[in-house]
Amino acid sequence: MPNAHPRTVLVLGGDGFCGWPTALDQSDRGRKVVIVDNLSRRKIDAELGTASLTPIQSPERRLEAWRETSGRSIDFVDLDVSSDVEALSAVLEEHRPDAVVHFAEQRSAPYSMLSTTHRNYTVRNNLMATQNLLEAIRLTRLPTHIVHLGSVGVYGYSSKDWTMPEGYLAVTVPSSEHPDRQVEILHPFEPVSIYHLSKCMDAQLFEFYARYDRLRITDLHQGVVWGTQTRLTKQNDLLINRFDYDSIWGTVVNRFLMQAALGHPLTVYGEGEQTRAFIHLEDAVTCVNLALENPPAARERVRIRNQVAECLRVVDVAGVISDSTGAAITYVDNPRIEEAQNTLQVTNDSFSELGFIPTFLRDGIWRESVDIAQRFRDCADLDRIMPHRSGEHVRAVGA
Ligand code: NAD
Ligand code: USQ
């Protein structure tokens, strides 16, 4: 079903860092948008004592500001997708969405490793959110296309001498009659955290529901997202997006940008020889839209797309920011269990073929996040910058 533009889109996790700008983008394209979010991320922030550097408004205030700014409405449903399949089915029945974008998961690798409680919460929340969504679509028999945000990290980061394909790996399975027989299998998983493990298990659920129940599913294997604002969140201060900078929620580029703004040395873990895939927030929103407008056909296997602009070593990310801002670099004992050094190449052919033109870190638009961090520097909790080892200073979250 190529180029079937959705008219109604549910955004699960639409109060979050990626979900909020995506919801605005879909609404701006004239689509009916419904955000479903249980605000668990805001509640976990309150429990951990972490907070967005930017003053994000309540969902109600944000949505009112969007109405005033754009003249468009977005509905909001406060619902735990992981625990209430009946309520989720009712939302689907009511709105009959052409597509659901699924961001509603616990997304921090460090958080998922804090304790047994955090490990179990991550697995339970993420898997049951995905399972309930799949089940709700099966039960309602809607032809809804699911677009899920997965992670490049499901493959792990041990160096490979091939470019990471988009989900499927061609392997040779020789037999006496067919010595060169090739088949495609799901690329093997090698997750680097319980969080990443939950994305691998999501992928297995998708494979089953696509094959057995004929659901139409796109899984986006996204790299680390950087940046703060998009064209739409910039329009009004009340629409401002979340900016995580602490050692549990802040991802590496945004942490470095905040650190540069506050005159803190950039916290490179280990020697910084880890290579990761990256994408700017605006590009991530663009790619989600491309995925929505190019769904798999009925009966197609799960469509896996790498949502990635470039691969960089952490020390090179620090170098770009340090060279331009004069920020010092500090090498911190790595609090994570991960390979000290790896190479990584990831194809993004399927988005390139749809016209995606990536933004690169060297293009310099990261400076706008430094400006934002400078503007809200008084809101920063400097004790939250340096990483804590597993379990330290953290109260239990969830059941
Ligand atoms: P976020 O924590 O800012 O947003 C996630 C949102 O989902 C939050 O608003 C939270 O309240 C909601 N949520 C979580 N569990 C829920 C549940 N059971 N029911 C309803 N709502 C629930 O995270 P983000 O950075 O916006 O990430 C969104 C998605 O993208 C995640 O699935 C993440 O794994 C994926 N992703 C993020 C990045 C990144 O760098 N931020 C990179 C790759 C993939
Ligand atoms: N790192 C530093 N210094 C810091 C913070 C991180 O050197 O101050 C290093 C980490 O050790 C790691 C790399 O930077 O090697 C990336 O860490 P990160 O926190 O930016 O990203 P990660 O934990 O991988 O997770 C983030 C998102 C997650 C998403 C993932 C995409 O939180 O939701 O799935 O990026 S990916 O990396 O492709 O798996």
Image (spheres, rainbow, N blue to C red):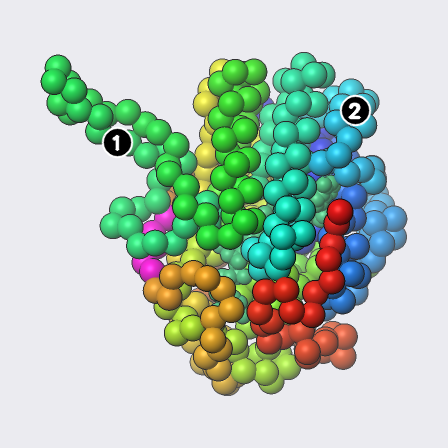
Q: Residue at x 67, y 14 (%)?
A: 141
What residue is shown with label 2?
Answer: 86
Residue 277: give x, y in percent of width and height: 44, 55
The answer to which image quadrant residue 14 occupies is: top right
CA gap, disc 1 and disc 2: 41 Å
Q: Residue at x 37, y 48 (%)?
A: 346
* Range of residues picked out in magenta: 342-346
As drawn, is 112 to the left or to the right of 159? right
Give the camera-side residue of 90 and 308.
90
| Mark 2 crowd level (few <14, some 14–19, many ≥20, 10 Å Cα) | some
As drawn, is 292 to the left or to the right of 310? right
The answer to which image quadrant residue 35 occupies is: top right
Q: Say if disc 1 is inside 8 Å of ligand 2.
A: no
Q: Residue at x 60, y 29 (%)?
A: 146
Give the overall secondary structure of the magenta segment. loop
Q: Say if 46 sits above or below 82 in the image.
A: below
Residue 320 in sight in this render: no
Give amino acid for label 1. Val
Q: Which disc, if any, is residue 171?
A: 1
Give the camera-side residue of 148 and 358.
148
Is 260 magenta? The answer is: no
